[in-house]
């Protein structure tokens, strides 16, 4: 029997969207609630909320052609906050979509890992795939905030909600919710 190597390689891309269960792993069946935003409020911020979301992965290595990737998006409750005087369903939906974008990119990253033909230089190839998706992820988060004007442009907000939900449905991968 061949020995398995579990690689404790955890990489992360993090977004701050300017909204002793400290994290939620993304799942389309569990929307965020205001009580999930448990971090200290940044009173000096020009934003009404901040969501701390990240995409992480680990992998199990058997050989350069045999890997298992575990990819997930986290929402960190104790790093996310909102200003109570600006609490609204519209703002919560905006913050939810930041987390949904993290969920989408966890699926895109998993698909990219699974569809790549690795060589003996697999560690660099894995990191390169991760870095490419990380750039795409941050660009999408930035574009989302710019086009929706941080939730103030209601029409563009609806367009983005539709687009992201369509993209999530196209990926076809299922994820579980884990709270830790």
Image (spheres, grey):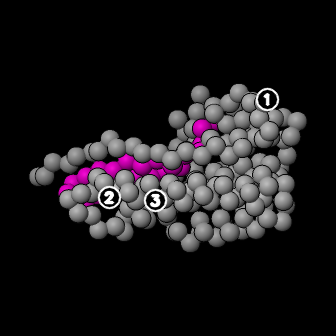
Mark 1 or mark 2: whose residue is earlier in sequence? 1
Residue 149: quarter of image: bottom right
Work out whether 48 lies above or below 136: above
Residue under label 1, please give it.
Answer: 43
Q: Residue at x 78, y 41 (%)?
A: 47
Q: Which residues are magenta?
A: 53-77
Locate residue 75: give its quadrant: top right
Image disc number at residue 68: none
* Residue sticking out furthest to the left: 1
Q: Which residue is mark 3?
A: 132
Q: Is residue 68 visible?
A: no
* Residue 104 pos. (x, y %): 56, 60
- The residue carrying pointer 3 sits among few (fewer than 14), some (14 to 19) or many (20 or more) residues within 10 Å by Cα, namely few
Tell me if 61 is positioned left or right of 105 in this view. left
- Tag 2 or tag 3, which sits nearer the N-term? 2
**Viewer-proximal residue among 18 and 73:** 18
**How far apart are the two marked residues, 1 and 3, measured between alpha carbons?**
34 Å
């Amino acid at each position: 029997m061949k020995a398995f190597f579990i690689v404790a390689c955890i990489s992360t891309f993090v977004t701050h969207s300017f909204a002793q269960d400290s994290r939620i792993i993304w799942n389309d069946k569990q929307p965020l609630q205001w009580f999930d935003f448990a971090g200290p409020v940044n009173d000096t911020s020009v934003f009404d909320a901040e969501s701390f979301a990240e995409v992480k992965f680990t992998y199990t290595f058997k050989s350069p052609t045999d890997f298992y990737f575990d990819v997930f998006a986290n929402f960190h409750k104790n790093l996310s906050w909102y200003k109570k005087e600006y609490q609204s369903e519209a703002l919560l939906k905006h913050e939810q979509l930041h987390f949904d974008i993290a969920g989408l990119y966890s699926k895109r990253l998993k698909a990219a890992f699974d569809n790549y033909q690795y060589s003996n230089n697999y560690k660099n190839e894995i990191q390169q795939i991760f870095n490419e998706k990380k750039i795409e992820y941050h660009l999408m988060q930035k574009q989302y905030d710019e086009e929706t004007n941080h939730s103030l442009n209601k029409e563009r907000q609806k367009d983005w909600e539709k687009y992201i939900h369509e993209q999530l449905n196209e990926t076809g991968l299922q994820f579980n919710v884990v709270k830790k």
